[in-house]
Image (cartoon, rainbow, N blue to C red):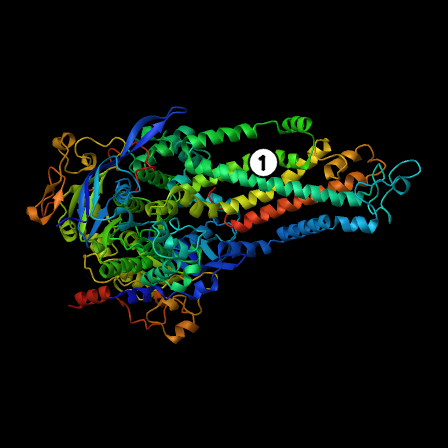
Amino acid sequence: MALLEVSGLTVSFPTPDGAVQAVRGLSFDVERGRTLGIVGESGSGKSVSTQALMGLVRGAEVAGSALFEGRQLIGMPAEELRRLRGAEISMIFQDPLSSLHPLYTVGWQIVELIRIHEPFVGKAQARKRAAELLGLVGIPQPERRVDDYPHQFSGGMRQRAMIAMALALNPKLIIADEPTTALDATVQAQILDLMMRLQKEFDTALIMITHDLGVIADIADEVLVMYAGKPVERAGRRDLYYRPHHPYTVGLLESVPSTTGAKERLKPVPGQPPSLLRPPSGCTFHPRCPYVMSRCRREEPPLMGEPGHQSACWLPLDVVGLGPEAARRREEESS
Amino acid sequence: MRPLLRVTDVRKYFPIREGLFVQKEVGRVHAVDGVSLEVRAGETLGIVGESGCGKSTLARCITGLYPVTSGSIEFDGDPRREVQMIFQDPYGSLNPRRRIGSIIADPLVIHRVGTKAERRRRVQELMELVGLNPEHFNRFPAEFSGGQRQRIGIARALALRPRLVVCDEPVSALDVSIQAQVINLLKDLQAELGLTYVFIAHDLSVVRYVSDRVAVMYLGRIVETAAGEDLYKLPRHPYTNALLSAASVADPDLSARRERIVLTGDVPSPIAPPSGCRFHPRCPKAMPKCVTDDPRLLAQGRPEGGHLAACHFPVEPGERLGSEKAQIEQESTEPHLEKGGGT
Amino acid sequence: MSLTEASAEAEHIPEQAEAVRGKGPWQLAWERLTRDRAAMVSLGVIAVIVLLALLAPVFAAITGHGPQEAFPATGLTPEGLPVGPGSGFWLGADSLGRDLFVRILYGARISLLVGLLSTLLATLFGVVVGMVAGFYGGWVDGVLARVLDVVLSFPYLLVAIVLVAVLGASVPLMILVIAFFSFAAMARVVRGQTITYKEREFIEAARSMGASKPRTMFVDVVPNLIAPVTVLATLLIPTSIVFEATLSFLGLGVDPRTPSWGAILSDSVDYYRVAPGLLIFPAVMLLLTTLAFNLLGDGIRDALDPRGEGGR
C-alpha cells in the first residue's frame, strides 16, 4: 500500500458564472521515501489539488478519495485533519513570510508547533529541538538565531526555517508548493540541495509542486504533468524528459530554450490555456494540439499505457518521444 | 562607430530617510553603483543577475524613469520618443479600467502624433504586428490572458517607432508555454523593425537565447560581460560560474553530470556593500587582496574579444571551483530589502 | 519565420475570448448587481420612495390636504387629539390636524433633496481634495491631510447649532453644513486610493512614455477611483439623510413649518401615546430609506469589486 493514494479527485468552485472545475479527476500514489513531482502551468490545478486534500481550500466542492495510510482525508473532520497537518503531513509554501507569524520569534513558533502536537515535551526540551532543527537546515549559530523574528531572516533563511518547521514533527509526507519560486537561482540551488539531503536522511515522502521543469529534473523520482485540471502524463523522471508521449509535455519541454545555447526558433505551444468554466470537449488540450484528430474533439482520453508511464492521449502509444531532443536521445542509445 | 546607447559610470542611490518631523537621511541603498556599458544599434544586450543586483533600477535609469545620482546616459537620438520600455507584470502594467485601443494609443496622444483617425489606424496596425486581433481594440485588459496582455504592452512600446526597447523581465511572469510565444515575437520584431534591445532577466537560458552580448550584475556592479557564447562557455568571474551552475536545467542527465557550485550565504545588503570585491564574502576563491582591493573590469583573453571580468583571480579554463558542498557559514543578518533595490 | 507566423501562434485563441466579448468592467458590474437580490429590492424601494416624493402634490390634491394646512375640524377629535388612520386621513393627522401621509411625502422630498445634493457636493469637493493630496504628496499632502483631520474632529452638532443661530435655518444652509462635514471622509478614501494607484506599474508605464502628472492623474487614476467613490457616495446619502433628520428633530433644520421627517418625529414626542402612528410612520420611512441606500451601496461594492481587491 502506498503512503498516499489519491483517486478520482475533483475540486470545483461555484461562482456566479458557473462552477470553475479546477481539478477534474486526478489520481496518483506517493510511496514512502519517494518524490512525486507535479508540474503544470497556472490554472492547471496542481496547487489546488493538494490544498484540497489538506482541507485548505474554502468554498470548494471536493470529491473523490484520498487514503493516507488507509485513512480517508476527504470529508475528514476539520479537527482531525488539523492534527494530521503538521504532525504527519507538513506543507511548505512559496512565500514563507505568509506562513511565519511576524510577531513571534522563529524559535517560539517551532516550540509551539512541537508542544501542540506533543504536549508532554517540556519547554526547554522543545527549544533545544528547535535550535537543533535550525542547525540541521543550515542556519548559522542556531542557538542565537532561535530568538530572531522572521523579518530578521533573509528570504533563503526563512525558507530554511519553514523547512525546519516542516521537519519538526518528523512527518511521513511533505508537500512543497513552489518552495523555491520566490528565491534566486543560487539560493534555490541551496534549498533544493537541502531538501534532497534531508529527505534521504529522514526517509520522508515528498510531493514537489512546481511550474519549473528544471526543478523537477533535479529532484523528482516520478512526475505527473497536469493541464487544465487533469493529469495528462505520468512517468518516471527520465522517461518524461527523454521519452515524453503527450503532446503537451513535448510542447512544454520544447518551449524552453535549448541547454546547449542553440538559437533555432523556439516552438511554443500555440494558443492559450482553456477556460475552466467551459472546458473544451473531448481532450482538454485539443484546441492547442498540433496532432489533433477528430476523435480528440469527441472523446476524452483516459490515462493509458504501462503502470510506469501513462499518457492521456489518443496517439498510438509507440509514438513515444515526439520531440527532436527525444529523437536525438533515441539515436544515441541505439548506436 | 558611435554606439546607440552609452552608459558611463552611472550610480543610482536611494536615500533611506527616518524621522517623524524632520526626515533625516540615515543611509543609502547603492542600487546601481558605477555601471558603464555600450549598446550598438541592432544588437541585444542581456543583463542578468539576482534580485537586488540593480538590473531593474539600471533599466529605469536608461529609460529616464529614475534620474541618475551621478554618471551619464547618452542616447544617439531623441531619448523621450525613441527609448521605450516593456514591463514585467502584464497585469499591473495595463490600466484595468481603460480599453486597450486607448492604452496602445497613449504614447501617440502624449506626444501629439497624428489625428484621431490616424492614431486609430496605427493602433490597429500595431495590434496586428504583435499578433492580436485588431478588431479587439475596444476590449478591456481583463479580457486577455497574460501572454496577450504582454503583447499589448509590446504594441504600446512600439507605437512611437522606438530604436531602443528596454525589456524588464518581459517573460518571467508568463507560463512556460506562453514565454516562447513572446520571445519569438520579440525576435521577429527585432528583425523586422531593426530594434535594439536591452533585455533584463534572471533566467539565464532565456537571456542566452535572445542576447548577442551578456552582462552579469552583482550588487549594483557589472562583474562580467562578454559575447553571449563566450560568457556561457567560459565564464571567468567566480560569481558567473556559480550562477550558471546553479541554474536548473530541464534535462535530468545533464543536471546530474553538472558540477554544482553551491554558494554560501545570501547576497549582502546594498546599503553597506562589502569592501573590496563585493563578491568576496561568498567567493570560493577569495584571497586577502579581494577584501581590500576593488577589482576593475579588465579584458580576459584577447583584448579585442570584448570579454571583461572584474576579478583579481579569474577562473581559468578547466579550473574546478569548489564542487564540494560548502558549509553555510555567514548568512547575512540583514533583512532582505524590498524597496528601491529593484530586482 | 515571419510576423504572420507569430500572429498565427497567438491567433489560435478566440473561442473563449468570444464568450466575454466587449463586456467592460462597468457592464460586468451591472450584470453582477442585477443578480444581487438585496440590492435590486433596495433599488426598487428607493424608486418607490422617489416616485412617492415626486407625486406628493398629486396625493395632496386627491386627499384635499395641503402639506402645511391644518384641519382642526376633521383632523382633531372633539377633545383636541389627532385622529387615527382612516379614509379621510390615510395615516392619521398630527397634533395640529395636518395630514400625516401628505406631510411624510413632502418630507421625503426634503430628505432626498438634502441627501442627494449634500452628497454630490461632498463628493465633488472630497474627490478634488483627496486626489490632489494623494497625487502630489509632499507638503501639499501634509497640509491637506491636517485640514481633513481638523474637519473630522469638529463637534459637528455644535457647529451646526451655532451656524443656524447666526444665519437662520434654511435648506441651502443645511446642505452646505452636511456637505462640509462629510467631504472629509470622502477625501480620505480618495487620497488613500490615489496613493495606492500611484504605485502601480501602469502609472510607471505612463511616466516612461513621457506623460505629465495631470494627464496621468486624469487618464489613469480617475477611472480607477470611480468604483470606490460610487460606493462611498451611495453610503453617504443615508448618512446625510439621518443628519438632516437629526438637525430637524432638534429644530435646527429647515423652517419648522416645512414638513420634514425629523420635524415630524420631533412633533410626535408629546403625542405618541395617543397617536403612535405619528412616531411609527416617519420612523419607518427613515429606516426604509437609509437601509435601502446602505444595502444598495453594499451591493454596488460587491459588484464592482467581486474578489475584494481594488487597492485596499
Amino acid beneath label 1: Ser
| Residue sitting nearer the eye, A334 or C82 | C82
**The image quarter in which residue C251 lies:** top right
| Residue sitting nearer the eye, A111 or B154 | B154
Is residue C90 found left or right of A307 in the rendered image?
Answer: right
> What residue does disc 1 label?
C182
- Answer above or below: position of B312 versus C36: above
**The image quarter in which residue A97 lies:** top left
How many marks the image carries: the answer is 1
Is residue B338 found left or right of C33 in the rendered image?
Answer: left
| Residue sitting nearer the eye, C87 or A94 | C87
Residue at horizontal 33 percent and vertical 30 percent from the top: B16
Residue at horizontal 47 percent and vertical 45 percent from the top: C222
- Residue sitting farthest toward the left: B302
Query: In the rendering, at what x and y percent does residue B48 appear?
Result: 23, 46
- Image quadrant in which the N terminus of chain C is located: bottom left
Crowd class of label 1 (few under 14; some 14 to 19; many from 20; radius 10 Å): many
Question: Numbered disc 1: what chain?
Answer: C
Residue B83 visible at all: yes
- Answer above or below: position of A56 versus A6: above
Query: In the rendering, at what x and y percent does residue C36 appear?
Result: 60, 53
- Answer above or below: position of A134 versus B93: above
Is residue C75 found left or right of C170 in the rendered image?
Answer: right
